Amino acid sequence: MQAVRAAGFSSALISYEELVNGNVAQALKFVKESDIQVSGVYRGWMLTPLQYEALYTGLLQKNIRLVNIAEEYLHTHYLPASYSKIRSKAPVTKWLPVEGNVERNKVLSITQEFGDHPIIIKDYVKSEKHYWEETCFIPIAFDQDNVQEVITRFLALRGDSLNEGLVFRAFEELEYLTRHSQSGMPLTKEFRLFFAHRKLVGIYPYWSEGKYGDTETDLSDFLQIAETIDSRFFSMDIAQKKNGEWVIIELGDGQVTGLPDQADKFLFYEKLYAILSR
């Protein structure tokens, strides 16, 4: 909060619990109505598109217009919604909307497209990567029994928190850093970029563990792609493959994307304020 205010932003607390329970007025009871329309940025836990739309509408009634409209939030929050914009630099990705029970035949028809290559499983927003072998990684895509086992476990863990459906992605051999000290999952050389009004706010090491060394990254391709993204504030996670090539892992709405531990929070909000104030 100190870094936010030092940058020039004013701030107010929103009740996440009330918001996700549909009590928008209660969620915003500490937010003062503005005399004139002003811009705002939500920084908090992830919301479903419907929850975000309710937040956007509630704040607009107080003369506060969030930086992203609901359609822009969805565009970067759901991987399938933005995949066409990043596919030239992203792993091959397929998806399956889920309503009720998952149809085994539909799942297998998708996974078989990857042949004998490894894949990872997630939903439209999140994975369960800290349970790497049980719920995320499938070494051979056409191993039907393993596919069924991993997806069953993944769906059980996600439960009611499942975001829209299943996503199947080609596993990329990324530059290895270390093993996560708690979950044991492999950590790879990844960076998180933030963009506001399609201008780069900052680039930060994704993980706080492992040695990144003096990594030089040519951002030109990613800056070009950022120009096409339908969002005023978003994040872009990139990673280095073992062959040296850089790929986009995913995008995210900047308002609900975490700032990596090693980031200078004061400098981040200072740059964000400068760009959004133009």
Image: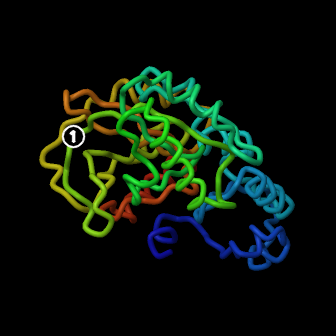
Q: Residue at x 42, y 29 (%)?
A: 91
Q: Residue at x 43, y 52 (%)?
A: 271
* 166 vs 115: above or below: below
- Rendered location of residue 184, percent (x, y): 28, 61
* 116 vs 171: above or below: above
Image-quadrant location for residue 247: top left
* 84 vs 182: above or below: above
Query: Camera-side residue: 174 or 222?
Result: 174
**Quadrant in the picture for the C terminus:** top right
219 left or right of 157 in image: left
- Rendered location of residue 210, percent (x, y): 19, 57
Question: What residue occupies the far left of the structure in this picture?
Answer: 213
40 left or right of 219 in image: right
261 left or right of 168 in image: left
Query: Camera-side residue: 33 or 223?
Result: 223
Q: Amino acid at mark 1?
A: Glu
73 left or right of 274 in image: right
Q: How many marks?
A: 1
- Rendered location of residue 163, percent (x, y): 65, 50
Per the image, label 1 sits on a secondary structure element best described as loop
Crowding near pointer 1: few (<14 within 10 Å), some, many (20+)? some
Question: What residue occupies the far front of the structure in this picture?
Answer: 145
Q: Residue at x 79, y 66 (%)?
A: 34
* 91 vs 52: above or below: above
Query: Camera-side residue: 156 or 64?
Result: 156
Colouring: rainbow
Query: Residue beneath label 1, please?
Result: 175
Image-quadrant location for residue 236: top left
Query: Camera-side residue: 80 or 132?
Result: 132
Q: Residue at x 27, y 35 (%)?
A: 173
Image-quadrant location for residue 155: bottom right
